[in-house]
Image: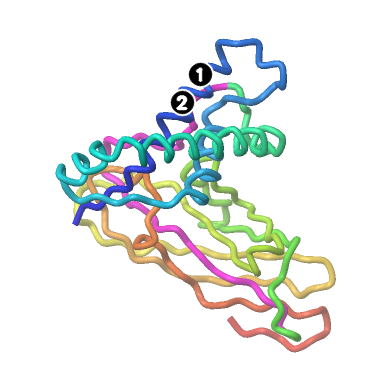
Amino acid sequence: MDVHNTIEDVVFRAINEIFDEIDKGDNPHGLCTCNQCRLDTACFVLNRASPYYIISNRGVARVEQEPIERQQLEADIVSLIHEGLKRVSHNQRPYSSHRDHTVADNEPSDRLVFNIPTIIGRLFNGINFEPLADIVVELYQDGQLVGMKDKNWQNPYTLVKNTKGTFTFWPEAIPAEGENIHRIFKYAIKVDAPGMEALHHFFQIPVTSELKSVRSFSINRTFKIQDLYMFPLGGDDEDD
């Protein structure tokens, strides 16, 4: 089933128009117009705008027959874009160069690959079961840090308070020799934190090779690992 949110089209078109106009002007406020900031602004807007889903060309026709509502919608979106670009530009991602209008990807799309799913887990204090924060979580394979899908995904990953102990990784695709090959990939989560016992958690992910690299995140392509716990030095031992 193919469902499309038409608000995404409106948002991305308006963002590119507004950012391109800023590029052409003097930009006295020094707003960043790189692709990373455009994507961050789009997320800011889409998280605040009501979606409008369609499943057919009749849905598109219906949208086009609502000019007054559409004009108000576009005005509201433009307002959100201006708010978002100011926030994003003044809180830029530190790992991005902010110099170009393309997002660097670590892999070509036209090849046979094993698409590794997004890895999601949670880390808690083993004594009081509170989610941990300000702790670095690392993903390893064969003793090496795993490369991520693109620069929007980090490894190592630093836990922050508002995500309640949740960490995520999206490993880059691995080349395959053919299609529909089944293979099991072994990974390890490693965490070293001051005053806590080191945590090493090993797990496996079964993957089937495909014709091309997956580019878009999907909740259906996730691998959730068991909740992990860290204990203060000298406390109870954890058995992985």
> Are the residues tagged 2 and 1 within 8 Å (C-beta)?
yes
Picture coordinates of residue 198, whole percent (x, y): 72, 71
Which label sits on residue 156? none
Mark 2–mark 1 distance (CA, rounded to whole Å): 6 Å
Majority secondary structure in the magenta region: loop
User: Which quarter of the figure is the C terminus placed in?
Assistant: bottom right
Please provide the residue range marked out in magenta: 100-126
Q: Quadrant of residue 82?
A: top right
Q: Answer with the quarter of the image where residue 83 lies.
A: top right
Q: Observer-nearest residue: 107 or 9?
A: 9
Q: Position of residue 72 (x, y in %)?
A: 43, 38
Q: Is residue 60 above or below residue 187?
A: above
Q: Which mark is residue 20?
A: 1
Q: Residue at 80% of width from left, 86% of height from top?
A: 235
| Residue 150 located left or right of residue 9 | right
> Residue 185 at x, y = what percent?
40, 62
Q: Secondary structure at mark 2?
A: helix
Q: Circle 1 — which element?
A: helix
Q: Front-most of 35 and 196?
A: 35
Q: Is residue 107 magenta?
A: yes
Q: Label 2 is placed on what type of residue? A: Asn
Q: Three-letter amino acid code at disc 1?
A: Asp
